[in-house]
Image: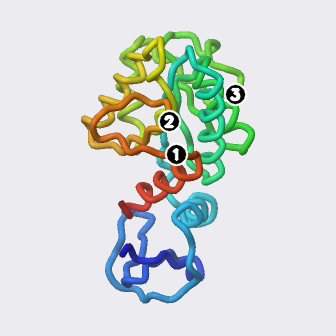
């Protein structure tokens, strides 16, 4: 059974006695086991907002030509991850990327858009930080590398999104956590999630090195 997380006067602990060190982003043995039980999402939110936790970016990936169902889940995931306080990365343009950005903005989050072109104006209106890379589809590798974990919201339905699949493949090769929502492509190593809340909990667990 995984140890319970405890918040104790500005310190995040586990019931096995380990303390989370924000400087090294690692659990350090010793330090007691007292405090108030918290979930992984609540612990991550506290670290990012009050505990000087490192603002590691998470990515949301999906197709530009997205179905209404994919747009809905993209927006839900964007909002759920932003509410934790994680900065987010996406491709910056339309479709699932715009929906995720909209959800992120609604929660007051930070969305970084890595654009394939050299014109930042191609970013959707909800992107907080548009970055014009000028490297075309090679920016898929950049997204996978920059994020500590990714959530894929779609790409399996026709037309199949090979760009999304490439992002997933890059991330899996790098050992990143890749979460797949209902309409995400099936690739070995992808962890399936049924809801945005589940994706947020798994993302928080990875942020805290609990999984």
| Residue designated by label 3 | 126
Residue 27 x, y percent position in the rendering:
36, 71
Judged by depth in the image, the label closer to the viewer, 1 or 3, is: 1
Image position of 178 with respect to 13: above or below: above
Specify few, some or many for label 3: CA neighbours under 10 Å numbering under 14, 14-19, or 20 or more.
many
Q: Secondary structure under badge 2?
A: loop
The picture quadrant where one finds residue 42 is: bottom right
Q: Is residue 190 visible?
A: yes
Q: Secondary structure under badge 1?
A: loop
Q: Nearer the viewer, residue 145 or 189?
A: 189
| Residue designated by label 2 | 182
At 38% across and 64% down in the image, what residue appears?
210
Q: CA distance from mark 1 to mark 2?
A: 7 Å
- Is mark 1 in CB contact (under 8 Å) with mark 3? no
Which of disc 3 and disc 1 is earlier in sequence? 3
- Residue 1, labelled with which disc? none
Q: CA distance from mark 3 to mark 2?
A: 24 Å
Residue 136 x, y percent position in the rendering:
42, 11
| Residue designated by label 1 | 194
Q: Secondary structure under badge 3?
A: loop
At 30% across and 29% down in the image, what residue appears?
169
Residue 85 x, y percent position in the rendering:
61, 51
Image position of 133 with respect to 37: above or below: above
């Amino acid at each position: 059974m995984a140890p319970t997380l405890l918040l104790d006067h500005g310190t995040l602990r586990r019931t096995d006695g380990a303390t989370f060190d924000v400087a090294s982003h690692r659990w350090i043995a010793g330090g007691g086991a007292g405090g108030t039980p918290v979930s992984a999402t609540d612990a991550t939110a506290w670290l990012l907002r009050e505990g000087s936790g490192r603002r590691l970016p998470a990515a949301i990936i999906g197709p530009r030509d997205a179905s209404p169902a994919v747009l809905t889940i993209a927006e839900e995931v964007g909002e759920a991850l932003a509410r934790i306080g994680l900065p987010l990365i996406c491709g910056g343009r339309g479709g699932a990327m715009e929906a995720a950005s909209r959800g992120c903005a609604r929660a007051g989050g930070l969305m970084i858009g890595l654009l394939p072109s050299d014109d930042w104006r191609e970013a959707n209106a909800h992107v907080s930080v548009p970055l014009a890379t000028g490297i075309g589809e090679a920016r898929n590798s950049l997204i996978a590398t920059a994020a500590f974990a990714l959530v894929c919201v779609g790409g399996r339905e026709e037309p199949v999104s090979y760009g999304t699949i490439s992002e997933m493949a890059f991330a899996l090769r790098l050992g990143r956590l890749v979460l797949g929502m209902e309409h995400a492509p099936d690739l070995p190593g992808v962890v399936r999630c049924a809801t945005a809340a589940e994706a947020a909990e798994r993302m928080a667990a990875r942020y805290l090195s609990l999984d």
